[in-house]
Image: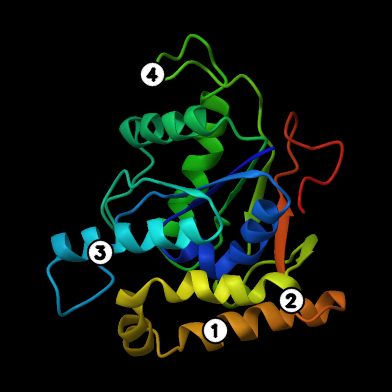
Amino acid sequence: MNVLAVGAHPDDLEILCGGTLAKYAKQGHTVFMAHLCSGNMGGQEITPEELAKMRDEEAKKSAALIGAEALGPIADDLDLYPTKEMRIALVDIIKYAKPDIIITHSVNDYMPDHTITGQLVFEAAFTATLPLYKTKYPAWEKITPIYYMDTLAGLNFEPTYYVDITEFFEIKKQMLLTHESQYKWISGHHQANPVNMIEKMSGFRGFQCGVEYAEGFSCAKLWGRIPISDLLP
């Protein structure tokens, strides 16, 4: 099975669904980790250009830890909009990955790049199925089920599915720790320790479903997208 996870920035997937992606990879599935934004605004003591390059390298290192392929970006931070150009760029990511499942942001998350990513994925996943909508790659005619991952701190999000990541929490943490450029930024700008943040979030979702650590998801319950079986690991 091909799994495509689409986050807004490098490190979003690690925080919100890294354990699930590691579990997929361990089970032998092919995992793609896409970030749509370069991450060039996530700092203050470095130029945006230098930071974007650094964060792309960090994303590739993180993906390599589980044998995944890193894809993106298609825009700089806060330059992501639901335009035709952005949709086409994401359509080609989807056509390239040929996913059986797509995981992305809830449209109820806390900042514009996250909410627009969720919107763009919804639009592009359908557009990618159309043979007459010509882009770089041929159509991927499967209407792929979309699962929304947790929001930051779980606010405005009620999971309907949980994935036990207890055995994969350590690799989730190691994936997050590859994003060295973000330690100081998250601690200063968001007043949060990255590792403590994922411990609390995954621990709380685990408490809800009776395991040590878990990640929460909901499925886009729309015609043509409801899977006949649970695709989560």
Q: CA distance from mark 4 to mark 1?
A: 40 Å
Mark 3 or mark 1: which comes first in sequence? 3
Q: CA distance from mark 2 to mark 4?
A: 40 Å
Provide residue 225's location: percent of width, then percent of height. Answer: 73, 34
Q: Which residue is mark 4?
A: 135
Q: Secondary structure at mark 3?
A: helix
Of circles 4 and 3, the one toward us is 3
Which part of the image, by quadrant, shows the C terminus?
bottom right
Provide residue 1's location: percent of width, then percent of height. Answer: 69, 37
> Looking at the image, is 135 positioned above or below residue 15?
above
- Using the rendered view, name the quadrant where residue 90 is placed: top left
Q: CA distance from mark 2 to mark 1?
A: 12 Å
Disc sitting over residue 197 in the figure: 1
Label 3 is placed on what type of residue?
Met
Q: Residue at x 39, y 56 (%)?
A: 60
Label 2 is placed on what type of residue?
Arg
Q: Which residue is mark 2?
A: 205
Q: Residue at x 71, y 65 (%)?
A: 216
Of circles 3 and 2, the one toward us is 3
